Amino acid sequence: MHRIPRPRLRGPAAALAAAALLGGVLTTGATAQAAPRTNGRLTDLVNPFIGTQNEGNTYPGASVPFGMVQLSPDTGHNTGYDYGENHIRGFSSVHLSGVGCGLGGDLPTLPTTGDITETDYAKYAAEFSHDDEKASPGYYKVGLKTGIEAELTATQRTGVQRYTFPATDKANVLLNAGQSLHRTLSSEVEILDNRTVRTAIKGSGFCQDTKAYTVYTVTHFDRPFTTSGTWNGGTVTEGSKKSSATDARNGAWLRFDTSKDRTVEATTALSYVDAKGAALNLRAEGGRSFDRVERAAQRSWEDRLEGVKAQGGSDELRRTFYSSLYRSFLAPNVGSDVDGRYTGWDQKKHRAKDFTYYQNWSLWDTYRTQAQLLSLLAPRESRDMAISVLRIDAESGWLPKWGYGTVETNIMTGDPVTPFLTNAYQQGLLKGYEEEAYRALKKNADGVPATDSAPVGREANVEYLKDGYAPYIKDRPHAKPGDSDYDHGASATLEYALSDGMLAEMARDLGHDADAARYDARAQNYRKIFDPSTGFFRARDASGAFTGPADPAQSEGFHEGTSWQYQWMVPQDIPGMVDLIGGKDAANQRLDSFFAYDKLLADPAKTAREVWVNGPYAYYNADKYNPQNEPDLIAPYTYLSTGQPWKTTDVVHAALTLFTNGPTGMTGNDDLGTMSAWMVLSSIGVFPVQPGTDTWGLSTPAFERVDIKLDRRYYPRGSLTVSAPGASDTDRYIQSARLDGAQQSRTYLTTDDIRSARSLSFTVGSEPSAWGTAPEDAPPALG
């Protein structure tokens, strides 16, 4: 037991020096008002262009929540759209928000005029200006310098385009089946009649070649075309109805006479099953005018955003908040057709019964923030997502790591699927599936996939189970495509141990006591890579020797980070980690150095941008917080466990200044909503400090009040209000907290607290207080 000193309260001068902390993120509480809106729609606060520059890798195009289709412009950037580029190659149907490698971009479609002379979309791309561009949830519009206006909207499984051409008898629509953001292995196009075109596109990629997947499309126009043809390589053939190609350009072109009627509408339906599935999706969701589809898409987004109503805060904060909330609902994506069929990871056709099948799993990222946010705001969909992950195990033999479409990519390392599924269990989303989920997780935690299967699972598990750590083996040949845990042995050890801690909790709840004890013991394996001579975690080689530079800022064996940044990623046992580095005083000194805390108080926005962030992919050679990447997203909340919870608010609110209402307003890749969900949760003041359990850490909200609508099936009270009256730049420190009127001294809630309560209210002031500083107030260690 350690005696926890009470915080030293700072004087008025210090408080004034810190007053700029939120850099305008909060306005004075007494006068804070919602940003004025002409029609009261929350969708009007969303800016889809945030993150489209400086490698945020978001997309501005049209989709609906969790939709299969993301119809968006591609400008030449490897992930789709870059705000700094001024030519559009096509409007393609598949995008993921914030991925780091080329992925998707299937069937780029572009309207043109004149003769078809080029078949490479880099050459026939159309110039545009941002002055002629507009985007909102479910809608995108751009004026091309060819004189054509393009508008996009979407349903769940279709993308709808409306093109307004100049008066001409040579108005064309190009459907490019042979080029995309990843490698297109083969493609087929077929013109079925004078309104309809069908394609089959086989693709592979995401940072490297992977097992192939196939997406099927059918595009139906609202009017007949006058003539048509195909291209293959550089050869254009008028009148041709079919074309196929292997690893080469391939497509179809359709011509319209717009001398009188200048608009052309087209609906493209997708299926990952077969051509029949695409046709069924078109029949079920097509047939409506562009305007009707756009209105329905907007309504679907308004319904989602209305689940969280924030009051107070600056216009900038409200816009970045609702834009982040919007991005949090973009993925995972529906993978099953309207008849329930989907292609499993065994590449066979299956049918989802009583659930919707989802795909696209950036689990190394999303298990830390987005999975928990969706469990609050979209529990029914979250349940189906968790069931979908279990279907992957049942059909392919192993749980996923980073899944795209119908295949495993093995991108990233560790064991992210375990906290993803244990979170679903702890949030009550796996009723009826508890034992199935546990069996799959136990198999994953205690073994490795077969050598002839695609997944790598816990690749270094043999050594980890034998020695207690995953070895760092530099330049070891990869047995399978993707990342290797052996390349990142130190961080893989921490990730495995975290997952063991979360699985131990689930095992204990289900009565598997012997397993729980075994996983509890393994959750302590983070200690096996602690180097007492440096006081930091450090990689060990196959012989057990510490390896790589001793300087924790120059460390090797950590995936997209350094030992400094991974120091805090022991959520299953923060007290044990704190003891390792010398106790709470030593931990607080190290945290203060890590966050450049003195500089942060003097100028939070400058510290965030110039000390913490050093470039979109600057993952290494750093001893400071990196809020644009996943390994230390949880780090600001470590202060909740070291007796200084007010510093969590200071750091979190400084990090919030990195989210701005412009193309560069995303801090790093969004990673399928991970960074956006961090912003949303941290702004609300409730954050998953132990991902994979039901523990939520607390900090001062960035708003005076947030009303959260909850699904009564999972949260009987139906709502939760988080309030901090008078919260401002100066008055940001929690003085006391109440849960449904009862004193709340703990710095955390459980999901049961959220289910049973209607209100969480904070009293705030200009000085730190003793709130939450007692040892029993901190989030508990697991086990």
Image: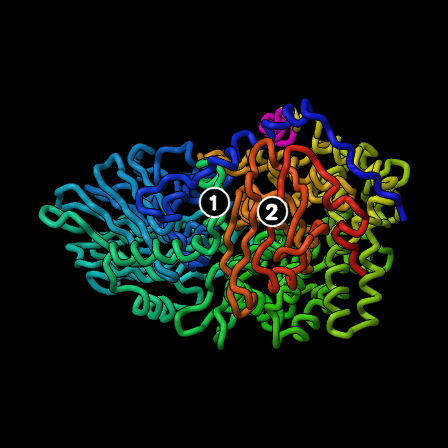
Tell me the residue at 21%/37% (across/down): 147
Q: Residue furthest left?
A: 260
Q: Callout 1: helix, strand or loop? A: strand
Callout in the foreground (1, 2): 1
Tell me the residue at 34%/45% (across/down): 90
The image position of residue 730, as x and y in percent, is 60, 31
Q: Which stretch did the figure color magenta? A: 603-614
Q: Which labelled disc corresponds to residue 685?
A: 2
The image position of residue 296, as x and y in percent, is 32, 58
In the image, is 157 to the left or to the right of 526?
left
48 inside magenta stretch: no
Badge 1 amino acid: Gln
Front residue (pair 430, 460): 430
Badge 2 amino acid: Gly
Residue 12 seen in render: yes
Tell me the residue at 55%/39% (across/down): 726
613 inside magenta stretch: yes
The correct choice, above or below, for 538 with respect to 204 in the image is above
Neighbor class of circle 1 (other Cα within 10 Å; few <14, some 14-19, many 20+) is some
Q: Which labelled disc corresponds to residue 709?
A: none
Residue 478 seen in render: no
Q: Which labelled disc corresponds to residue 311?
A: 1
